[in-house]
Amino acid sequence: MKRIAAFVAAMFLLTASTWAQDGKGIYNKYSDNENVSAVYISSSMFKLMGKVPNMELGEGSSMDLGSIIKNLNSMYLLDCDDPDLCNEIKSDVSKFIKKYDFEMLMEIKDKGEVVRIYTTGNEKTVTQFIMTASEYGAFTFICLDGTMSRADLEKAIAKATQQMD
Amino acid sequence: MKRLEDIENLSILDLEQIASDESVKVPATLRHDIAVTARALEMASKEDEEVKEKTASHNRYRNILRMISYPAAAVAIITIGMRLSFQDSIPTPKDTFDDPKMAYVQMEQVFGFISEKMNTGMDIADAAEPVIDKTINALR
């Protein structure tokens, strides 16, 4: 009986340890921390955003994200500036990336900052998009969840680039 | 010809007398036949032992498999059950914005940030292009 109880406890701990290994789990685990800035946008909010006609957002807001937004389920953003906590988040994100077989799209190393972009999906569709930006003592995690056309996603990023130029 | 019952009723003395009777000829191949029979019996008993051993080891494997399969099934069921219950129990976070316009601005900022970082990468790649071209030309 003791063995069974120990076994069930071990299974419980094992399952609990993998709990935080997705975008939602990671967000839930760290979003309330005082050293973390967190943003979550739900699928309901994305639907609402899609329904607002001709969204006038003022100067510098001409980016058309309509095609992307209508297919998004959630967006999680965590921005951390506590070195120890950053390492903890990084470790969870790394487990998440390994668990879901993410493909690395791009890695940029510039002036001590390392940016990595990962996606899952197929040639035409992206089901999850992750970007991590890490430099000493700071870490940013962005996770987009939904069914986005690769072409639309590239278009949105390109438009953002043009707008910045 | 004597019957088996007659032989069984003979006393030891009678048997000794018969054995010492040299008029009865012993078949020349008797020793060989006895040896062959003994060897055949030995081999048969060995085979029997091997069969028994094989059956025993087969039963042992079956017992081990049976012993492993029940806990393995229990492990699988408990793990799947716990996973499902945990997945269901992960609370959905509360939306950061109540206003869709604010959320849209946030999304623009997110895409701007992604774009900025990707641009840095593209700039580094562009800067490296002449060097790559030079190297390719030098190799040609």
Image (tube, rainbow, N blue to C red):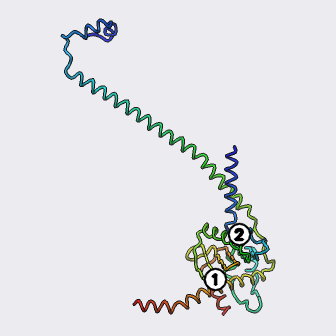
Tell me the quarter of the picture where residue B105 sits: bottom right
Chain to which mark 1 belongs: A
Question: In terms of image quadrants, where is residue A121?
Answer: bottom right
The residue at the point 71 percent across, 67 percent down is A25
Amino acid type indicated by mark 1: Gly
Mark 2 Cα shell of 10 Å, populated few (<14), some (14-19), many (≥20): many
For the N terminus of chain A, the quadrant is: top right
Q: Secondary structure at mark 2?
A: helix
> Can you identify the residue that label 2 sits on?
A26
A160 in relation to B72, above or below: below
Q: Mark 2 and 1 residues: CB-CB less than 8 Å, in contact?
A: no
Percent position (x, y) of residue A143? Answer: 68, 75
Residue A112 - label: 1
Query: Which of B26/A137 is in front?
Result: A137
Please identify, in this view, whether the residue under mark 2 or under mark 1 is nearer the observer.
Answer: 1
On the image, the x and y values in percent for residue A130 come to 64, 76
Give the side of residue A81 with respect to residue B66, left or right: right
The residue under the point 67% across, 80% down is A135
Mark 2 vs mark 1: tell me if same chain.
yes
- Tell me the amino acid under the disc marked 2: Ile
Disc 2 from disc 1: Cα separation: 25 Å
Q: Quadrant of the C terminus of chain A?
A: bottom right
Look at the numbered disc 1 and give the secondary structure of its residue: loop
Q: Is residue A79 above or below residue B61?
A: below
